[in-house]
Image (cartoon, rainbow, N blue to C red):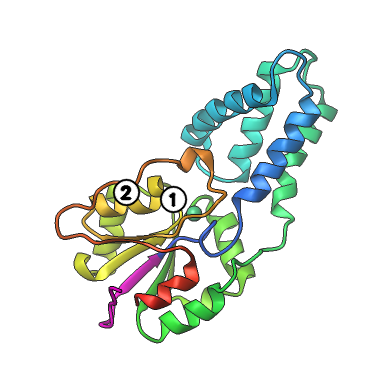
Amino acid sequence: MTSFSSRQTLLIDADDTLWENNIYFERAIADFISFLNHRAYTPEQVREVLNDVERDCIVRHGYGLHSFAHALVDTFERLAVEPLTPGLHQTVVGFAHAIAEHPIEIIAGVPETLAYLRDRHHLIVMTKGNITEQSGKVERSGLKPYFSAVEIVAEKDEPTYRSIADKYGLAADMTWMVGNSPKSDINPALAAGLNAVFVPHDNTWVLEHEAVAEPASGAKLLVVESFAALRGHF
Ligand SMILES: [Mg+2]
């Protein structure tokens, strides 16, 4: 097994890597689709419309609950036969806001693994989304003390990874992005010349689905079955 005993920097994703996130969105979407109860569109067809609307909303409003609430409202307006009354608007937005009320559910093995890694390596949380929502989750998770810094970014693309590496003076060959999303965590980090650890999650947001890229020459890619399995490598 490959093992990296010298001090490395681990940039660690949060949603669906440290704690559950997408399952709450999936529940909200299921509730929304039941509520819409469309006569002509199947639930799968409604979901396809919502996915398209969400892509547009991300461009306009970024990631987060505010954007998701817009996507539900826009989808309702596109598909519902009846007009969107204030009461219906409140119900639809309520499906999104219910997500904020879930307590943080930490993924099994995460705190122990962070405690182990922190003594050996340099750990930074790197999450994308709304600053207030993401920093609130980091605080409520109780995991913040394991990290030397928290980076909340608007998008995780190649330039973002390069700028974070510059900001902290990180050597690419000793820096790893750890996360569940090929699209946001693995592929852009590899494109920026960093190493990456893919920790697949069974319930990854459909808009994050992408094939894992081949690492650029010299960069390393590990795939582990769980966050706790990082212990076997670092
Ligand atoms: Mg994630």
Identify the magenta region.
1-11
Residue lying furthest right: 87
Q: Residue 171: image x %, image y %?
A: 20, 69
Is residue 84 depicted above or below 18 in this figure?
above
**Type of residue at label 2?**
Asn
Q: Residue at x 43, y 48 (%)?
A: 154
Is residue 181 depicted above or below 206 in this figure?
below
Specify whether 192 is left or right of 183: left
Q: Residue 209: image x %, image y %?
A: 45, 41
Q: Residue at x 36, y 84 (%)?
A: 120
Q: Which residue is label 1 attached to?
A: 181
Is residue 1 depicted above or below 225 in this figure?
below
Specify whether 215 is left or right of 126: left
Q: Which residue is label 2 attached to?
A: 187
**Residue 2 lies in the magenta-colored region:** yes
Residue lying furthest bottom: 119
Q: Residues within 10 Å of mark 1 (few under 14, many from 20)?
A: many
Q: Is mark 1 within 8 Å of ligand 1?
A: yes
Q: Quadrant of residue 172?
A: bottom left
Name the residue nearer the viewer: 165 or 40.
40
If the image is split into quadrants, where does the N terminus sit?
A: bottom left
**Type of residue at label 1?**
Ser
